[in-house]
Image (tube, grey):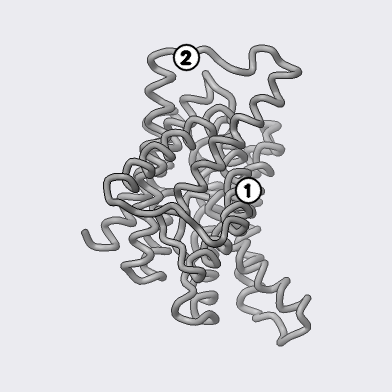
Amino acid sequence: MPASLMMALATLLFATMGVCVKLASAEYGAGEIVMYRGLVGVAMVGSLVLARGLSLRTAVPAMHFWRSLSGVIALSLWFYAIGKLPLPTAMTLNYMSSVWMALFLIGGAVLMGGRAADGRLIATVLVGFLGVALVLRPSMQQDQAWHGLVGLLSGMLSALAYLQVTALGRAGEPEYRIVFYFSCGGAVAGALVNGVQQWGQPQAWHAHSARGLALLLAVGLLATAAQLLMTAAYRKGRTLVNASLQYLGIVFSCLYGVWVFDERLNPAAILGMLLIVGAGLAATLLRHRSLPPDSSHPATES
């Protein structure tokens, strides 16, 4: 399958997963959804490992731990935002990760006392945050500013997770191993978060229904399949083409929002999304030009 087709399919699966997360949020907390998503991922990747005789032994367990920690927190915040915000808004805020990485590059240049930060990167970051302001403006009028900030934070932590995935790739870790340990981290962290909630709220663990179980299973299957497809697309295809196609997820989310949830976006929010997409693509282009050829990061869910 061509890399471009794998990337387009991955974005569609992620957007569909977002629909399932939003629907499941009516029956489960974010911690529960993250836990079950992790369990399904462990089962899927574990089965793949057994079937192909692969190895899960790693020489860099600490790197997997920190990657899983940042990724799981980002995922939890993202799922929470999906449950509280319009689906396109939550998806767009998470896609700010490329802009956050540009901001990290600027901060690194300043802290290391090296060359001056690229003015184009600074402009990209400013445009991205202008887009965020336009996207969140209608939400703030509905007293949802906190939820918007949670979604924005999920994008920032996703950027950290992407950088850690890059480091794992340089250390020779294959995609399936990265996804497996991330899924393990999600299962454990989701259970811990929900356990902490349970001390103060006895009904934190929700009873299952046929609909709820189907949604949880769908979240795990869609997320894991999308992760594997997207990672393979980045390994096989061109980074800039994949980064461009990745933003199809926002388009799919807008269509799902109108079709499934009867959500409507005003012109300011649409303009904000376009600014975020443009800033993200520009940040990816500038970052790609500034790094060696082997450092293109394989994207993951978080």
Which quarter shows the N terminus? bottom left
| Local SS, label 2 | loop
Query: In terms of image quadrants, where is residue 222?
Result: top left
- Please indicate, yes or no, whether residue 240 appears anywhere in the rendered image: yes
Toward the left, the furthest residue is 1
Give the CA separation, mark 1 to mark 2. Answer: 27 Å
Local packing at callout 2 (Cα closer than 10 Å; few below 14, some 14-19, many 20+) is: few
**Closer to the camera, 266 or 49?**
49
Residue 148 image position (x, y, % from top left) = 65, 41
Q: Is residue 244 above or below residue 254?
A: below
**Closer to the camera, 235 or 175?**
175
Q: Residue at x 55, y 70 (%)?
A: 283
Residue 145 image position (x, y, % from top left) = 70, 38
Local packing at callout 1 (Cα closer than 10 Å; few below 14, some 14-19, many 20+) is: some
Query: In terms of image quadrants, where is residue 50?
Result: top left
- Please indicate, yes or no, whether residue 159 appears anywhere in the rendered image: no
Q: Residue at x 47, y 14 (%)?
A: 208
**Disc nearer the start of the sequence (1/2):** 1
Q: Amino acid at mark 1?
A: Leu
Instruction: Give the labeled residue for mark 1.
Output: 69
Q: Amino acid at mark 2?
A: His
Residue 276 image position (x, y, % from top left) = 54, 58
Residue 176 image position (x, y, % from top left) = 40, 53
Instruction: Give the labeled residue for mark 2.
Output: 208
